[in-house]
Image (tube, rainbow, N blue to C red):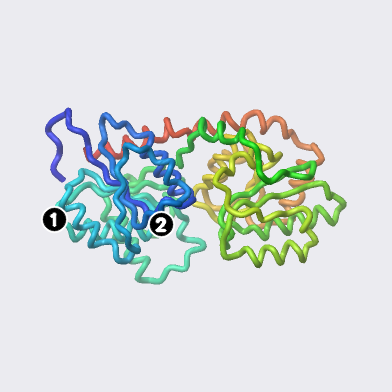
Amino acid sequence: MKKNNNKDMKTSVFFFLSNLSGGGAQRTIVNILNGIDKSKYNVKLILLKLNSDDAYVDLVHKSIPIINLNTRGRYAFWKIKKIIDKEKPDILFSTLAQVNLAVWLGHKCSFHKPKLVLRETSYRTFGKNLNRLSHLLFKRMYNDADNVIALSKGVKNDLIELYGVKSDKITTIYNPIDTEYIFEKSKEECELGYSKDFKMVSCGRLVEQKNYSLIINALSIIKNKGYENFELFILGEGPKRDELNDLILECGLEGNVKLVGFQNNPYKYMAQADLFVLSSAWEGFGHVVAEALATGTPVLSTDCPHGPKEILQDGEFGWIVDNNDYIQMSDKLIEIIDGTIKYDDYKSISRERAQDFDVSKIVIEYQNVLRLGS
């Protein structure tokens, strides 16, 4: 890549993303775009598909140009190649596996060769049924990149062990959260009010990874032990809705567990809850854990690979139970409800920990990586 000799010239960075629908990766890129130093970087957002009603469309600052490729990931690489050759950006930044593949292929085919930065968000050893060809493509892709950003230390280790990426090529950068925005949104009134004394909330798509059956089974145990004045709101939509609804009915929890669907503002539900619960089987980071902390709500999480344990610093800033252990989770919930452990101590330090992930700090870490190619 040809370097800018004029120190006054800005570095042009093209950010690639699938869409602006609700999701941790999408919110992260929006935070980076809005927070990046515009006196040093010219940024553009290139989307595979732009829908005007996507959850995060209105959060992107109006000064940031958006290019809509209007195509699926597998067909996007040629359009990406043409954009690279026409506009000659200094740096390509991509996140999410299928988008990464399209950008990598477009970069391989282009005549202009900007720096390529790829961000990996998933723990690929577990939970991903990738065929041999996909693994070979990912291995080549991440080793070809100039820099790789891993969402957690666990994801970094996964990239090294699974794909042989050199450690010094990988930078671990946690998801940025806009703590001020979250705090302000958390003050809004909930359309759906909690009706029980002990209020819990979970947030994320209704998919296998989120393992909501774990928390439902844990709650079934505590109800059978005589605890009834509790309520869990699960925020999100997905293919497991019918299956989870059947499990709720089977466990007799229809008065305690509510599938309330996707919420544009989950923070007000987090703030009104006594506890945020993450039941995931695996995570790249666990964005909602950091967001819950920012609302001042204590967190109970499974020790899933990899991010939540890093966010909670081995239990210093929240409770951690063994992965996929609903009995241990039920025991911990009873301790919390009964007040036999120091709930208020965690509540007082939740926002303090969330500041470590504030966008103002995390964006500087991203700029440090981008600066290597400017």
- Using the image, determine if residue 244 lies above or below residue 283: below
Q: Quadrant of residue 40?
A: top left
Name which residue type carries label 1. Phe
**Numbered badge on residue 158:** none
Label 1 SS: loop
**Numbered badge on residue 161:** 2
- Using the image, determine if residue 37 lies above or below residue 326: above
Identify the residue shown where x is 42% and y is 46%. Answer: 57
Q: CA distance from mark 1 to mark 2?
A: 32 Å
Residue closest to the eye, 304 or 223: 223
User: In the rendering, at what x and y percent does residue 30 appear?
Assistant: 40, 42
Identify the residue shown where x is 66% and y is 44%. Answer: 191
Q: Can residue 53 be seen?
A: yes
User: In the rendering, at what x and y percent does residue 203 appear?
Assistant: 60, 49
Q: Can residue 160 be seen?
A: no
Instruction: Determine whether, in the image, residue 283 is placed left or right of residue 328.
Output: left
